[in-house]
Each structure stands twice: as C-alpha cells, then as structure tokens.
Image (cartoon, grey):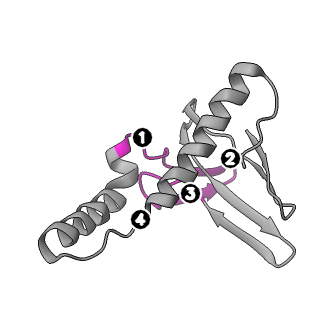
Amino acid sequence: MVMKFKKGAIVTLTMSRSACYGYDQRCEIFGDQGLVCNDNEYQHSSVLLNTTGVHQSRLKHSFPQRFKQAFETELEAFADTILLGKPWPIKASDCIAVQKVSDAARKSREINTVVVIS
C-alpha cells in the first residue's frame, strides 16, 4: 500500500504474515532529519558471526509472543479506566481515522485505483 500525505510524505506499507523466515513487520521512517527504525523481534538476542555468515534466531511467530507487553499495557489502561476512573488513552477520533485508512485501502484494492481520504 502506498499513502501520500498533504505535506508531501509518502508511506509504502508492506507486511507478510507468511514470509519463509517469519512474521515480518518492520517499520522505517526516513526524512531529512534522520531515520527511525522499528525492527522485527527475534526469539532471542544471540547472534553468531562466523566464516559462513551471520546467524540468529527466527522471528517471534505468534501474536502473543510478539505483542505480550502491548496487551499487558492495554489491560492496565482498561483496568485504570474502569476501576480508577482515569480517561481512556485513545480518542474516538483516532479510532475513526484508522478506520478511514483501512476502509480506503480495502476500497482501493477492490476498484484498483487511488482512493482519496478527506
């Protein structure tokens, strides 16, 4: 998926849940001020470098393995909202914006053309 923003940013989004080496979900943001990277998580952090190359563990496979901390944080926020009356950290407008992007991506695939989100 390619997204172009009003201020000129271009985003290319690809992911694979069935890559032969695991669930690939890297993120890179590149701009004139630098680069931000969020890499895949591996089963462990050991790396072997020898005469045959660089070797490391496979990527974390399952959803619970990859998102354990995120799920725990969401549960804590939910409990804080219900039990302590704290505000929910995600605004309805954020949810609506994400849904608009998802709907536009689906529609673009179906009609095979660019869909503009207003």
Amino acid tagged 1:
His
Q: Nearer the viewer, mark 1 or mark 2?
A: 1
> Is the Cβ of the residue at disc 3 closer than 8 Å to that at disc 1?
no
| Residue that label 4 marks | 90
Along the viewing direction, whichever of 113 and 47 lies nearer the viewer? 113
Disc 2, disc 3: CB below 8 Å? no
Mark with earlier residue (4, 2): 2
Q: Which residue is mark 1?
A: 61
Q: Residue at x 37, y 43 (%)?
A: 63
**Picture quarter with the N terminus:** top right
Magenta segment: 39-63
Mark 4–mark 2 contact, CB under 8 Å? no
The secondary element bearing badge 2 is classed as loop
Q: Which residue is situated farthest in the left direction here?
A: 83
Q: Quadrant of residue 74?
A: bottom left
In 3D space, how far apart are the residues under numbered discs 4 and 2 (Cα atoms)? 48 Å
| Tag 3 residue | 48
The residue lying at 40 percent from left, 51 percent from top is 66
Lateral position of residue 114 relative to residue 59, left or right: right
- The amino acid on which the numbered mark 2 sits, given as a three-letter code, is Thr
Residue 85 is inside the magenta segment: no
Cα–Cα gap, marks 1 and 2: 25 Å
Q: Residues within 10 Å of mark 4 (few under 14, many from 20)?
A: few
Q: Nearer the viewer, residue 70 or 53?
A: 70
Residue 41 placed where, x, y %?
49, 55
Of callouts 3 and 1, which one flags the residue occurring earlier in the amino acid sequence?
Answer: 3
- Number of the front mark, 3 or 1: 1
Q: Is residue 55 magenta?
A: yes
**Amino acid beneath label 4:** Ile
Q: Which residue is mark 2?
A: 52
**Residue 40, percent from left and from top:** 55, 53
